[in-house]
Amino acid sequence: MKSLTEHLWFNTKKRREYVNITPQVEEVVRKSGVREGLCLVNAMHITASVYINDDESGLIEDFDEFLEKTAPYDLKKYRHHRTGEDNGDAHLKRQLFGREVVVAITDGKLDFGPWEQIFYAEFDGRRRKRVLVKVIGE
């Protein structure tokens, strides 16, 4: 069995950003040489997510609006802020969008359904964060 682990690094300019990372993940899969297996893509920070969906700008705006309505950025709202932090909303947004995705690798390529793409979602940006990509298989 083969295995390859790499990290993708991000430093977003905005507090909330959604970045299509499919090309970077595809490159790690290609580099691994795995033809049949699995690819784990995992946000390594508790205020960021990795998810799969369509890369359509209106949909991404809808996601952002939904998350902001559900867990708005509000310095007075969250008990977590008693610790001196200001990112209680980002923790909740991460729980809604999840930590990681696993994608099958078939014939050396990510095995997606129609329109599926992998995204890094940042909810407390403007600092350096990483995503783990781990490929295993034969």
Image (tube, rainbow, N blue to C red):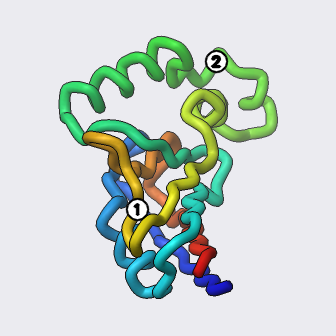
Q: CA distance from mark 2 to mark 1?
A: 43 Å
Image point (50%, 80%), residue name: 34
Of 137 and 19, nearer the camera is 137
Decide: is 66 above or below 2: above
Q: Mark 2 or mark 1: which comes first in sequence? A: 2
| Label 1 SS | strand
Q: Position of residue 69 (x, y in %)?
A: 46, 12
Q: Position of residue 70 (x, y in %)?
A: 53, 14
Decide: is 132 above or below 51: below
Amino acid identity at mark 2: Lys
Image point (19%, 26%), residue name: 58
Amino acid identity at mark 1: Leu
Q: Is residue 47 left or right of residue 107?
A: right
Disc 1 target residue: 110
Image point (40%, 62%), residue name: 110
Disc 2 target residue: 76
Neighbour class for label 2 at 10 Å: few (<14), some, many (≥20)? Answer: few
Image point (44%, 55%), residue name: 126
Of 10 and 27, nearer the camera is 27
Q: Is residue 18 visible?
A: no
Q: Position of residue 103 (x, y in %)?
A: 51, 55
Q: Is residue 82 visible?
A: yes
Of 120 and 82, nearer the camera is 120
- The number of callouts visible is 2
**Which quadrant is home to the N terminus?**
bottom right
